[in-house]
Image (spheres, rainbow, N blue to C red):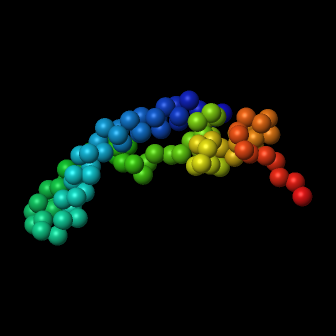
Amino acid sequence: MPKTSAIERNKKRQRLSVKFAAKRAELKALLLNPNTTDQEFFAVQKKLAKLPRNSSKVRIRNRCSLSGRPRGYNRKYGISRITLRELALSGKIPGVTKSSW
């Protein structure tokens, strides 16, 4: 089990990302607009840099929803490989069985 602080930090990043998503998208659209002048471009860059770093979507880490493990994350189920194996072997994930040949 990872530190609770790491899990809470990731939750904070998710909240910040949602909070600043609209503002960040608006500023990025201005940066990508070819009609933006150089002065406007640099002003928008400064505004974007002033936003909290943790509000960026790239900084969010995929974590297992049950154990909080950051590595071996399975996107389809939202859990780590170890938790997936435990749940599959105990029959708690419908349609998933252990393969044998």
Q: Is residue 61 left or right of residue 45?
A: right
Q: Position of residue 44 (x, y in %)?
A: 17, 55
When the figure is inspected, residue 5 is found, relative to residue 36, above or below; the finding is: above
Rendered residue at 12%/65% (across/down)? 36
Q: Position of residue 20 (x, y in %)?
A: 29, 42
Instruction: Give the quadrant of residue 84.
Output: top right
Quarter of the figure that contains the C terminus: bottom right
When the figure is inspected, residue 40 is found, relative to residue 88, above or below; the finding is: below
When the figure is inspected, residue 49 is found, relative to residue 15, above or below; the finding is: below
Q: Which residue in the rendered view is the most extreme toward the right?
A: 101
When the figure is inspected, residue 57 is found, relative to residue 67, above or below; the finding is: below
Q: Which residue in the rendered view is the most extreme toward the top?
A: 4
Q: Position of residue 72 (x, y in %)?
A: 65, 49
Q: How many marks?
A: 0
Q: Which residue in the rendered view is the most extreme toward the bottom?
A: 34
Q: Position of residue 9 (x, y in %)?
A: 46, 35
In the image, 72 versus 88, the foreground residue is 88
In the image, 75 versus 73, the foreground residue is 75
